[in-house]
Amino acid sequence: MHNTLRIATFNIHKGVTHFNARFALHHQRELLRKLQADVVFLQEVQDVHAKHSKRFMAWPELGQAEFLADVIWPDYAYGKNSVYPAGHHGNALLSKFPIIQTTNVDISAHAVEQRGMLHCEINPPGWTVPLHAICVHLGLFAQWRHQQLVTVADYIEQHVPLGAPLIIAGDFNDWSMRAGRVFAERLRVREVFEHHVGKPARSFPSWLPVLRLDRIYVRGFHVKHVEVHSGPQFVKLSDHAVLTATLIKEL
């Protein structure tokens, strides 16, 4: 049914495991393929890194976003947020459907921490209006997160029609869960795990999740199913779990 959408969000930790011990990008791609998501929201995608590309033999020449998209997700977008002498990283979005417009917005709240928001308009087959997909990675400090969520909400109110299907997903770093509630009320969005099971998902650290850092907010969808993908095997993948949701577009 073309009104059903499966999505995933994953902070890939720049394609390497905790403390940069092991190159994990190939295993991450394998995992994402198994999840069979139509749209994937990715954070900490490191498209260029001069030192890592020499250190890790299997580092992709074309960049991590294109490598992960490969033949499964024909369309992808990468939003460069953090730039440094060795390279850059940011958010990425992989889509099985055409991405018709992409906007990358700098939402940094402080010079020491560069953060961004990637907004893609996507054309799923048979839909009369585009899907607005927004991938975010928020700051480590509550004051910065609050400021960033105001910036994201301002942007959405200006650029996303109220009746349009909307998904906002990513690493919110909002372990206290305070900032997210204000954000959700303002935009009339709901967090899929909170709606389905009572609380946002535990997603960090991925091998034994305790903190609720990652989120999926939606507007214009019914939530059919949600799942946290975590466990001991994630020691070889990333410090964040993968969250998935199956959504049905409201008619």
Image (cartoon, grey):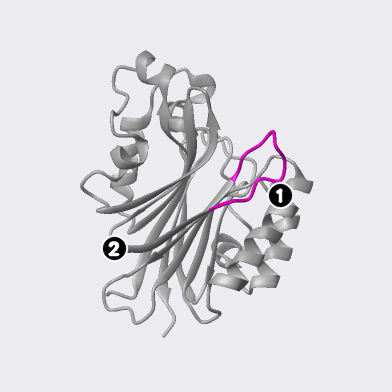
Instruction: Pick whichever of labels 1 and 2 is earlier in the sequence.
Output: 2
Secondary-structure class at tag 1:
helix
Left or right of 36: which side holds 103?
Answer: right
* Picture layout, residue 65 above or below residue 2: above
Which residue occupies 71% across, 46% down?
Answer: 109
Q: Which residue is mark 2?
A: 97
Q: Which residue is mark 1?
A: 145
Left or right of 40: which side holds 186?
Answer: right
Q: Is residue 168 visible?
A: yes
Residue range corresponding to the magenta coloring: 105-115
Which residue is outermost to the left? 71
Which residue occupies 49% across, 65% down?
Answer: 167
Of residues 118 and 174, which is closer to you in this image? 118
Separation of marks 1 and 2 at Cα, in angstroms: 31 Å
Residue 184: % across, % down: 66, 67
Q: Amino acid at mark 1?
A: Arg
Q: Quadrant of residue 224?
A: bottom left
Q: Residues within 10 Å of mark 1 (few under 14, many from 20)?
A: many
Of residues 129 and 218, which is closer to you in this image? 129
* Picture layout, residue 191 above or below residue 126: above
Residue 164: % across, % down: 48, 77
Q: Is residue 106 magenta?
A: yes
Which residue is outermost to the bottom? 251
Q: In which quadrant will I find the C terminus?
A: bottom left
Q: In which quadrant will I find the N terminus?
A: bottom left
* Picture layout, residue 1 above or below residue 20: below
Which residue is outermost to the right? 143
